[in-house]
Amino acid sequence: MKKKLLSLLLAMTMVAACFAGCGNKGGDAASNGGDATASEGEEAASNGGETVKIICGYGAGGTADLLARKYAETANKLQGDYNFVVENVTGGDGFAAATQFAEEDANTKDLLVFGYGLCYRHDLGKQFGTEEVDFDRTAMDPIGTVDDRTWIVYTTPDQTLEGILDKAKNGGIKMSGGNPLSDCHLELGSLIALEGGNVMVVSGYEGGAEQKQGLINGEVDVFVGTTQAAKDEVEAGTLIPILAISDKAFEGFTTPDGPIVVPTVAGDAKAPELSKDIDFSGCILPAGGTLATHAGADQAFRDDMTDIMKKVWEDENYYGWIESVMLNNFQLYGDDAQKFMDEACEKAIAAYGNLK
């Protein structure tokens, strides 16, 4: 493996120490809250049940925030024993919320939007010292999955996947849409590394709109975001999706010339520009996340939360919205959700090994 990522690793150390945002406020997944922990507001109560906070570590308007609010809205309509509200606690790209949650009493009736990317950075930080981690992820106990997403690599219409790969091998490319060691960076970064290239993450954008604008302005070569993050730009023809980090072709985008199918990094729809003799399936990491209670929470409360979650997923108000924003309907509960998360973290560590 060519070790062409020294500059990237140095950049990761500096940026991660400052807790640069992944996805960022108003973007596809997260909020760039800086080092400060700040509550950005709590959704008003809408029924008379016992209040349960859904703590979201990302800013208002991002995918995780919108998903949490749709979940709360749906759950409140389906039952009256609990009133779900959403509170945004930003900072450290989800670290601030996770730390706060982990320090609460186990009987506090809060839930946490607990993403895979946060777990990846937790495990890498604990094992390799990539960044300081002030919480233990075993303090969170997933009750079920609420979000499953496919990362898409976007670029401008004057560029191609072939050109991006060539540039990555001859000097390197820059990406927006994640901070170093975020899930989207681990996926694209490990793929480019296997191709013998180099990726540098450009952080500091204040939201998904700025991340996309950075691509349009030529500040970066690619933007990695969720399927709905640049849907409007694809329809307008200002950005194009060139790669789905998946083993299934992604259908759902419409360009000015009509519907398109986005090629993948593995499987039958693998992009022909990628090296045919390299297996890139290890670059596909689960993206999205779960809702979690505190480890040690009252079992009756956990059972109630699981029952409500299953009802939410059965309601068209929720699963229909998931489909409308081109996220994936993927359901696991309890021990199965925890096992899936643990296995995902093992894959992330392997992807990190490619970067090294």
Image: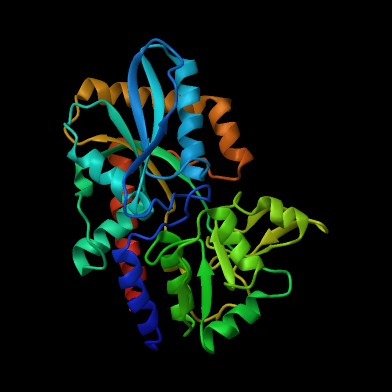
Q: Is residue 71 visible?
A: yes
Q: Residue 293: give x, y in percent of width and height.
A: 27, 33
Q: Residue 38's image quarter?
A: top left
331 lies above or below 10: above
Q: Is residue 349 left or right of residue 270?
A: left
Q: Quadrant of the C terminus?
A: bottom left
Q: Could you tell me which residue is drawn at 53 percent across and 82 percent down?
A: 168
Q: Could you tell me which residue is drawn at 32 percent across and 54 percent down?
A: 35
Task: Report the front residue among 80 and 274.
Answer: 80
Q: Residue 215: give x, y in percent of width and height.
A: 61, 67
Q: Residue 240: give x, y in percent of width and height.
A: 69, 63
Q: Is residue 76 left or right of residue 262?
A: left
Q: Could you tell me which residue is drawn at 37 percent across and 65 percent down?
A: 181
Q: Quadrant of the N terminus?
A: bottom left
Q: Could you tell me which residue is drawn at 18 percent across and 26 percent down?
A: 107
Q: Residue 284's image quarter?
A: bottom left
10 lies above or below 180: below
